[in-house]
């Protein structure tokens, strides 16, 4: 029985089964992995700790179908360890093309989603993932030539099964309201699809990530590439489920001076 719904109450923007979460099928994505240059400590909230050097990844996906509709997504990831020693991925920037996905991500998980133009295009030479906001302002591009199969062990080393994701949920309010500020740990289960021969659709090859425009409004370029580690192209199904609250603060809005760190 569906129990999680958004507003309007008589016509919710999204609704989902709290046990199964959001389900996806027929997805494709390009991914780039790298060590991050520069000081990005301010991007990570308290309770999480970066690697040295910081490990980053960017995924640009086309979700062909899901229980909240089809959409594109751009997500930046930083590998972190929480205060209990649990390793996971923190999301400093994430963009989607679907208002239900934006609202569900922000309201339930705290994912800092914005709307943008996102594409994953399979061309004759390579697969190109792109992010633009606004549409005339290209912010990021990943190019991967799917030249050979990516080994399961290598994929698991980049994104181990069961890896938790972290996001910072901040709900402001008018004077007199209670503001909520909390770190959420949630789950992503990804199943790579098989082709007609029974081989999984995961590829690697010559790859790159670039930031054509360095925007102060959408500074995704702050995950700057120090050492490029590799790229991948995947076709998969997926399930996102809510996990748990790591820590939570509430404070009256008129006296709130919330600190991210």
Image (cartoon, rainbow, N blue to C red):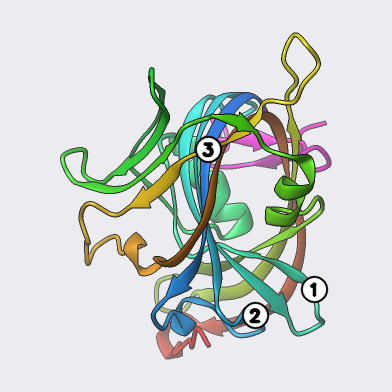
> What residue did someone put label 3 on?
205
* Separation (CA) of disc 3 from disc 1: 31 Å
Q: Nearer the viewer, residue 107 or 198?
A: 198
Most distant residue in the top direction: 196
Looking at the rendered structure, which numbered label has been put on residue 86?
Answer: 1
Q: Is residue 18 magenta?
A: yes
Q: Is residue 50 magenta?
A: no
* Separation (CA) of disc 3 from disc 2: 32 Å
Label 3: few (<14), some or many (≥20) within 10 Å?
some
Looking at the rendered structure, which numbered label has been put on residue 48?
Answer: 2
Closer to the N terminus: mark 3 or mark 1? 1
Q: Is residue 240 left or right of residue 227?
A: right
The magenta segment is: 1-24
Q: Under tag 1, what secondary structure?
A: loop
The main secondary structure of the magenta stretch is: loop
Q: Position of residue 153 (x, y in %)?
A: 79, 47
**Please, is residue 251 above or below residue 187 in the view?**
below
Q: Is residue 247 left or right of residue 94?
A: right
Q: Position of residue 19 (x, y in %)?
A: 83, 41
Q: Nearer the viewer, residue 256 or 125?
A: 125
Q: Residue shown at 41%/66% (left/top)?
A: 223
Q: Residue shown at 65%/27% (left/top)?
A: 67
Q: Position of residue 215 (x, y in %)?
A: 22, 61
């Amino acid at each position: 029985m569906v129990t999680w719904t958004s507003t309007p109450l008589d016509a919710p923007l999204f609704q989902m089964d709290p046990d199964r979460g959001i389900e996806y099928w027929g997805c494709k994505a390009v991914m780039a992995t790298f060590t991050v240059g520069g000081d990005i400590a301010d991007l990570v909230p308290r309770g999480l700790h970066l690697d040295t050097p910081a490990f980053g990844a960017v995924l640009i996906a086309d979700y062909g179908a899901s229980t909240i509709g089809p959409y594109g997504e751009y997500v930046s990831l930083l590998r972190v360890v929480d205060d209990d020693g649990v390793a996971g991925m923190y999301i400093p920037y994430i963009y989607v093309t679907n208002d239900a996905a934006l609202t569900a991500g922000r309201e339930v998980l705290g994912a800092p989603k914005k709307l943008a133009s996102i594409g994953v295009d399979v061309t004759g030479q390579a697969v190109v993932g792109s992010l633009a906001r606004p549409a005339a302002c290209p912010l990021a591009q990943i190019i991967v030539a799917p030249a050979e199969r990516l080994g399961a062990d290598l994929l698991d080393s980049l994104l181990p099964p069961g890896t938790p994701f972290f996001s910072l949920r901040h709900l402001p309010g008018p004077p007199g309201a209670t503001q909520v500020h909390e770190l959420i740990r949630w789950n992503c289960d990804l199943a790579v699809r098989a082709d007609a021969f029974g081989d999984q659709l995961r590829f690697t090859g010559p790859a790159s990530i670039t930031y054509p425009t360095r925007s102060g409004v959408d500074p995704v370029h702050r995950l700057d590439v120090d050492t490029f580690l590799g790229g991948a192209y995947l076709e998969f199904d997926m399930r996102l489920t809510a996990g748990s609250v790591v820590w939570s603060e509430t404070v009256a809005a008129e006296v709130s001076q919330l600190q991210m760190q």
